[in-house]
Image: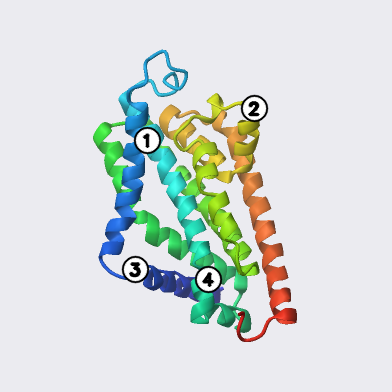
Amino acid sequence: MNSYFRLLKCEIIKQRKNTVRSRFTYFSLLIWPVISFFNAYYIYKPFSAQSKIATFLSSQTSLVVFLIIGYLGYECFWTLVRSALQMSQERQDGTLEMLFLSPANKLVCIYGRVLGSLIQNIWMFFCFSILTVVIVKGIPLAHLIYLPVCFLIVILGATAWGGLMNVIFLFSRDASIVFSLFNEPMHLLSGVRIPVTVFPLWAKCLSAILPLTHSLSIMRSLLINGDIASSLPSLLFWLTSIIVMLLLTIVILRRAEKNARERGDLNFF
């Protein structure tokens, strides 16, 4: 067990060193999510009280909290898709071959990589989100007891999602289509900036497939409404999606190892 934790720690440190090239990296980690947040905020701010969406965003404070939760969850998930795309750099550096050749647990390596990317890329926007919510006083004090649960929901969901994305890129030499497939569709359909309840039926069916949808639904139900009962259906879907993603990750990883042993060599190119 100690060896697993050491392996996890090494992967987290490796991801930090690979990601941070200069101090300007920290600036970019904050500025782009903040720009996206304010872009969405000023799009919805002029909506009239009769607007269908405005019924879900009854005040400026509720709008800020709704969007902050949405973009925080989105950044957690999306940063891991970007991390998975960097698997091509692992091929060039030779560390991908080392992963297959080493006796280390491959699944632990994958999740270590995921956690390293998540912590490194999200911490600045996380601090911004907490500061913004405190300033606007958007979450009632009684609902703050749900913060640890919400933190666990988004971290576990993003980690399972990131593990699946990484093994998909591990199995394929060019899985860049996944990068495009899960960018704008996930941004739109997961309820990041538009309540899922206003979608047509076909869009609701697509959004139900994405684990981010259920993570955001749970977080908003607990932090904004303080309603545990209404979050139970989303929690059930969330748990199901976590299990499915974990099983898919294990299956795809084993197939990737088998494919590397049968068809690969010391150089994947």
Asked whether, in this view, residue 130 is left or right of residue 199, the answer is: left
Classify residue 198 by image quadrant. top right
Element type where label 3 sits in the image: loop
- The amino acid sitting under disc 1 is Ala
**Residue at 61 percent of width and 59 percent of height:** 164
Element type where label 4 sits in the image: helix
Residue 177 image offset from top left, x and y in percent: 59, 56
Circle 4 sits on which residue? 88
Spatial CA distance of label 4 from label 2 is 38 Å
- The amino acid sitting under disc 3 is Val
Circle 3 sits on which residue? 20
Q: Is residue 123 visible?
A: yes
Mark seen at residue 201: 2
Spatial CA distance of label 2 from label 1 is 24 Å
**Residue at 51 percent of width and 46 percent of height:** 153
Element type where label 1 sits in the image: helix
